[in-house]
């Protein structure tokens, strides 16, 4: 394990189950210390990338993800909304840029991408957000090879498609698509030359063994994801997980630390579940290797701290927002 911590994973090295077991067995503060060490060897520990996530098509999804209020089959407060227009999306992207975000992500409540006018709107929006100098990410459900190539040509930086949990536990949460469906989409994204954003959710009722299997699968993706969002479940009334207990915050920090050690070069992103977490808990998360967060009052449909709250927190902690980098502009 020391080899893993000190030298990090090479491209062809496979992370073993024993290595993952050893990390989970570490006392909490020792794990955080080791993760902080790996973080400082690979990243500027004061720099945090701000990202903005916009729901461009909300609700009415055909999937049955047990945690998601956008599933059409659940009776939640989420109202179905049609696809936003490009100009409206561009307005949000410009505002995100002015607020310090360097990555703008568009999410649509689809089971899979279909080759229709809505996808044409996505492609045009990707092209124009790219032209603003922002990194552009999408999360649109399953994606085939040709669609991935079109998104790449339009200027897409990254594609988010989470594994959510272990393959075994996944079947208890989602029945309308398989784990292999998710892995196939990730493969299509990588083959198109788009960076992969892939993480999961903890606190859905999974066992510790499920968490181990999840990070083992995640760490052995080739290439490793460029971005890894770690979500804490936000129980939503009307979904099958509405009565799930809120996770202990130290378990969230532990997963962030383990992700940092196993995926040393990746951005580890603080995602859903932050609204109920104190500044002190989030400070521990940054110490443990988190170097990105979603900012803005909503993450698709769930609450999130407001932009000013996050800026004030970063200032208090002596952290700084990552500056934008020149983006390749597609013709």
Image (cartoon, rainbow, N blue to C red):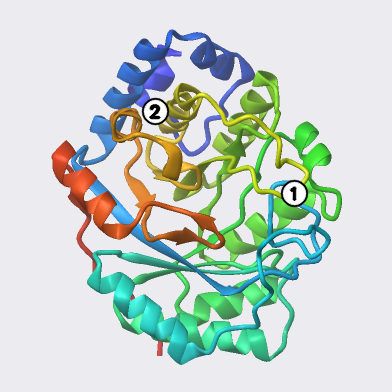
What residue is shown at x 65% (from left), y 48% (from top)? Answer: 236
Direction from residue 198 to residue 182 in the image, left or right: right
The label shown at residue 8 is: 2
Give residue 57's position: percent from left, percent from top. 62, 76
Quadrant in the rendering for residue 192? bottom right
What residue is shown at x 75% (from left), y 70% (from top)? Answer: 60
Mark 1 vs mark 2: which is more N-terminal? Answer: 2
> At numbered mark 2, what does the secondary structure look like: helix, strand or loop?
loop
Give residue 179's position: percent from left, percent from top. 77, 46
Quadrant in the rendering for residue 234? top right
Q: Is 298 situated above or below 80?
A: above
Q: Is 54 situated above or below 27?
A: below
Q: Nearer the viewer, residue 57 or 9?
A: 57
Quadrant in the rendering for residue 317? top left
> At numbered mark 1, what does the secondary structure look like: helix, strand or loop?
loop
The quarter of the image holding the C terminus is bottom left
Direction from residue 320 to residue 8 in the image, left or right: right
In this orientation, does residue 104 appear? yes
The label shown at residue 157 is: none
Mark 1 vs mark 2, CA separation in Å: 39 Å
Mark count = 2
Give residue 136's position: percent from left, percent from top. 43, 70
Q: Nearer the viewer, residue 266 or 169?
A: 169
Give residue 247's position: percent from left, percent from top. 56, 28
In this orientation, does residue 327 appear? no
Q: Is 148 situated above or below 245?
A: below
Direction from residue 130 to residue 225 in the image, left or right: right
Q: Nearer the viewer, residue 78 or 140?
A: 78
Give the crowd class for mark 1: few <14, some 14-19, many >=20 residues within 10 Å: many
Label 1: which residue?
239
What residue is shown at x 49% (from left), y 46% (from top)? Answer: 229
């Amino acid at each position: 394990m020391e080899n893993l911590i000190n030298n990090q994973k090479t491209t062809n090295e496979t992370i073993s189950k024993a290595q993952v077991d050893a990390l989970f067995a570490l006392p909490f503060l020792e794990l955080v210390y080791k993760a902080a060490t790996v973080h400082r060897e690979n990243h500027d520990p004061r720099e945090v990338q701000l990202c903005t996530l916009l729901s461009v098509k909300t609700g009415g999804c055909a999937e049955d993800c047990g945690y998601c209020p956008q599933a059409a089959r659940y009776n939640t407060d989420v109202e179905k909304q049609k696809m936003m227009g490009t100009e409206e999306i561009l307005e949000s992207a410009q505002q995100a840029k002015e607020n310090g975000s360097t990555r703008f992500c568009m999410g649509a409540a689809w089971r899979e991408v279909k080759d229709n006018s809505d996808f044409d709107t996505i492609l045009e929006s990707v092209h124009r957000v790219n032209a603003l100098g922002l990194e552009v990410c999408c999360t649109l459900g399953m994606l085939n090879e040709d669609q991935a190539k079109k998104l790449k040509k339009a200027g897409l930086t990254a594609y988010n498609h989470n594994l959510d949990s272990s393959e075994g536990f996944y079947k208890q949460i989602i029945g309308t698509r398989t784990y292999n469906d998710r892995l196939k989409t990730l493969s299509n994204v990588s083959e198109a030359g788009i960076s992969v954003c892939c993480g999961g959710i903890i606190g859905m009722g999974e066992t510790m063994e499920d968490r181990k299997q999840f990070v083992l699968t995640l760490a052995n993706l080739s290439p490793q994801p460029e971005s890894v969002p770690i979500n804490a479940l936000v129980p939503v009334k009307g979904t099958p997980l509405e009565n799930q207990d809120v996770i202990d915050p130290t378990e969230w920090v532990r997963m962030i630390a383990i992700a940092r050690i196993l995926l040393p070069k990746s951005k580890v992103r603080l995602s859903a579940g932050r609204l109920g977490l104190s500044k002190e808990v989030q400070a521990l998360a940054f110490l443990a290797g988190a170097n990105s967060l979603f900012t803005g009052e909503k993450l698709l449909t769930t609450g999130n701290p407001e932009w000013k709250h996050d800026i004030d927190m970063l200032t208090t902690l002596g952290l700084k927002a990552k500056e934008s980098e020149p983006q390749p502009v597609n013709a």
